[in-house]
Image (spheres, grey):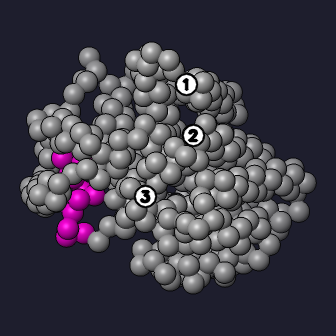
Amino acid sequence: MMRVHLPGDCEDIVRLQKRAGRAGLLESECEALSLLYDRVSVEGPSEEEEILALLTRPFSRRLAIPEYYQYTSLHVYGWFLSHYRKDPLRGSIVALHTTLVDLLSMEEQGARLGEATPAYIHERIRGLRGLLGQLDEIPVDRKGPLFVADMLKGSKKDAEEQWRAFILARCTGFPRSQAHDEYIFLRSVHACEIVFFQVRWLALRISEMIAADQKEAVFLLGQLTTFAELLNKIFDVLKTMSPERFMSFRAQTGNASAVQSLNHHAMEIAVFGFDPARASVFDGFEHLKRLNEPLFREHASLRSVIEATADGALAEGFAKLDRCLLRWRGGHYGFARKYLPVDIKGSGGTEGAPYLKRFIKKDDCQSGEQRPGTDSELARFFFC
């Protein structure tokens, strides 16, 4: 039977963080959570201590955790995916499905409790259901054919996998404010981080096998593009939030910004190559400096590998992917223009929309000759 509560003191720690949002915690409470993390991360490895460490790591005063990773708790996603070293794509699909289902459940619960549910909530629920339906229809094996929906049916029969998914959802849903719309913002960031990883992992997989089986490479490229398209659908759902509702909590997210996302930048390097214009950006964040190292600078991008094959089907497939990701970058820029007043800087210390506009095109990206496979450092899910 599926467990529905975390063990020991874990539920108390969850309730504490949800009580008034993480920004509403007292300094003494944050200090206590930091001390608890220091204790349980050393004492482990009981199940309760492991989960307590997941819940309290963002408060650590000992670890130098960038604000974006304090905000997003991506270490919990890293923990979840560490159980899928042999099949990281499967793990990422379960993680993405878990994240979207949790968000949908939250919105549906709010709709049931509200006496007069706003029209934008109904629109959001329809969008989330459509997004989950699109995820279900992604093929995961061309020989079956086998789709995500088929894979998830098997997952639901695995009690251990479902328990880990429950922990994932329970240990990551912590907005900083009490604003309802911050939850969809936070979960949208989580969902995008997973898709960034999926796109990058598949890009490495295609480059790894393209010479051995071009039919499979074409299939995987199509699969990659369908995952990438989810980024645009996530943004469509996110835009059910008005600029006014976004600004109601935006200040409480502090300097947490996707500009600081390792998974985002690594995805673009894997697909398009290293952008020299990003070098100074990477140098501006301690945890991003590694992206200026040879492993990333000299990586042979998926675009360059496909161009070298002169294969028409692969070229056509990549053009479709390119258009998809261009829509995503354009949508991100459009979101910043609409949702951030011109006199307010973007989170993370950037100039907001103008910063995003600089990187919409990928014409100047450089590609090297290193082609690390899916067992390399470049293939792992990044967090700090």
Horizontal side of 380 relative to 344 (left or right) equals left
Task: Tell me the number on the disc at residue 241.
Answer: 2
Residue type marked 1: Pro
Which of pointers 1 and 2 indicates the residue nearer the eye?
1
Q: Is residue 51 visible?
A: no
CA–CA distance in space, label 1 to label 2: 11 Å
Where's the C terminus, which quadrant?
bottom left
Mark 2 surroundings: few (<14), some (14-19) or many (≥20) residues within 10 A: some
CA–CA distance in space, label 3 to label 2: 16 Å
Tell me which secondary structure the magenta stretch mostly adopts. Answer: helix
**Which residue is pictured at 58% across the width and 47% down the height?**
243
Q: Nearer the viewer, residue 346 or 6?
A: 346
> On the image, numbered disc 1 is attached to which residue?
118
Q: Is residue 11 visible?
A: yes
Q: Secondary structure at mark 2?
A: loop
Quadrant for residue 139, please give it: top right
Q: Are marks 3 and 1 in contact (CB under 8 Å)?
A: no
Q: Which residues are magenta?
A: 50-63
**Which residue is pictured at 75% across the width and 69% down the height?**
362
Percent position of residue 62, x then y: 19, 70
Horizontal side of 116 relative to 319 (left or right) equals left
Task: Tell me the number on the disc at residue 251.
Answer: 3
Task: Tell me the number on the disc at residue 319.
Answer: none
- In the picture shown, does residue 75 fall above or below 233? below
Chain-order first, disc 3 or disc 1: 1
**Which residue is pictured at 62% across the width and 41% down the height?**
239
